[in-house]
């Protein structure tokens, strides 16, 4: 059953403006769960109505992130909206917008990303650290996300995507791409310096390798398996260390990089790999923490930490400027998404592969299937 301009539920006409040719259904397909680790139900759910500051996006594709798995399992000490529609890498078409929205028009291509909104008035927001805002609203966590055919997004934070962009391929850029791009900026490396990517062939790592190359860095990747080694080299990586085969990882990395990498981007979800990175990083180097394994602790031996003068930094997700820059790298062909597209109904199987550590590249779900 379709909803048109003349039948807009009970919402005032000033709140939503639609094209005269736009018809929006009352219900849609989505994946929802009602409790942590509960059944992921692919079912008919209501289409949300955008608030005055929001756009309604007809989501075509959504990337699947490890954060989505954590949200479902309740791994983090951060309250989750329940019931919840997860997902925060959605790419689609704007089909409706609230009365206060000035920066999007009907028919524009928009991206739904992790940070859905923030207060924009606190010290952190003023400095561009919007994701660190105490009042941040998070897609697929505190706000229903992109694992549905229609999703709302705060127009201020929604990403603008150029017309003609491949929506399946750009979807992972909205979180994975922005996240690793921001992490590389946080490492503050110079062209020609070495960066090690721990977890180099996964969804985040495969993009980190490409952004690092595009930024003029030499890239060493750490991961396990011949398939991951092949993908890493196909993406332009220089040296691959297989943690399954290498007996002394620290020594091997330091030898390959003539003293250790200048920076390390930790996207691995193994606590041991995170701690190990503090050992092989070059003196005065920077270790950047990105992956969020449940309950993990980063350990750094104090004497070595001080004498080597290393830095350990956390990097969350990028702001609006970082998002624009990350998408620009993609639009210019400097970064490609190594993706596998499956139907939205197959999301539970994708989560199983994630838990088993069998993800190569990035999975993207087609909301029409």
Image (spheres, rainbow, N blue to C red):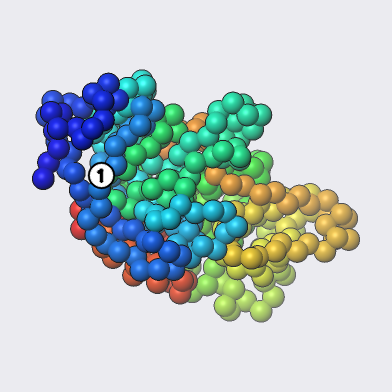
Q: Position of residue 115 (x, y in %)?
A: 49, 41
Quadrant in which the C terminus appears? bottom left
Which quadrant of the figure has residue 82? bottom left
Residue 39, placed above or below residue 331: below
Location of residue 326 in the rendering, given as x and y in whole percent from the top left corner: 47, 39
Residue at left offset 20%, top offset 48%: 27
Quadrant where the image shows the N terminus: top left
x and y percentages locating residue 73 in the rendered image = 48, 65
Please report the residue visible at 69 percent of the width from the left and 53 percent of the height from the top.
287
Toward the viewer: 39 or 349?
Answer: 39
Residue 18's place in the image compared with 165, above or below, is: above
Answer with left or right where residue 266 lies relative to residue 57: right
Residue 103 point in image, percent of width and height: 37, 23
Instruction: Report whether residue 20 is seen.
Output: yes
Q: Residue beneath label 1, please?
A: 47
Residue 367 visible to the viewer: no
């Amino acid at each position: 059953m379709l909803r048109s301009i003349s039948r807009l539920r009970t919402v005032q006409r000033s709140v939503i403006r639609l094209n005269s040719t736009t018809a929006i259904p009352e219900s849609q397909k989505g994946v929802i769960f009602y409790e942590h680790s509960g059944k992921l139900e692919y079912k008919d759910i209501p289409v949300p109505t955008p608030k005055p500051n929001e756009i309604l996006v007809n989501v075509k594709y959504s990337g699947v992130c490890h954060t989505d798995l954590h949200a479902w399992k309740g791994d983090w000490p951060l309250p989750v909206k329940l019931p919840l529609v997860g997902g925060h890498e959605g790419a689609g078409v704007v089909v409706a917008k609230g009365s206060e929205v000035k920066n999007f028009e009907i028919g524009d291509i928009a991206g739904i990303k992790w940070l859905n909104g923030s207060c924009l008035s606190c010290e952190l927001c003023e400095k561009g650290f919007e994701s660190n805002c105490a009042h941040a609203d998070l897609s697929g966590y505190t706000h229903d996300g992109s694992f549905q055919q229609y999703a709302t997004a705060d127009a201020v934070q929604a990403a603008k995507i150029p017309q003609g962009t491949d929506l399946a391929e750009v979807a992972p850029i909205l979180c994975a791409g922005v996240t690793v791009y921001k992490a590389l900026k946080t490492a503050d490396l110079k062209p020609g310096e070495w960066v090690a990517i721990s977890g180099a062939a996964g969804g985040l790592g495969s993009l980190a390798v490409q952004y690092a190359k595009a930024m003029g860095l030499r890239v060493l990747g750490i991961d396990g398996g011949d398939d991951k080694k092949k993908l890493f080299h196909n993406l332009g990586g220089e040296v691959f260390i297989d943690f399954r085969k290498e007996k002394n990882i620290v020594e091997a990395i330091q030898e390959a990089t003539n003293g250790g990498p200048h920076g390390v981007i930790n996207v691995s979800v193994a606590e041991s790999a995170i701690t190990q990175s503090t050992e092989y990083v070059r003196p005065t180097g920077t270790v950047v923490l990105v992956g969020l394994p449940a309950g993990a602790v980063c350990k750094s031996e104090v004497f070595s930490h001080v004498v080597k003068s290393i830095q350990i930094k956390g990097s969350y997700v990028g702001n609006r400027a970082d998002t624009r820059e990350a998408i620009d790298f993609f639009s210019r062909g400097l970064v490609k998404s190594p993706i596998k597209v499956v139907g939205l109904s197959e999301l539970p199987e994708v989560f199983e592969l994630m838990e088993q550590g069998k993800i190569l590249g990035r999975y993207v779900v087609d909301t029409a299937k």
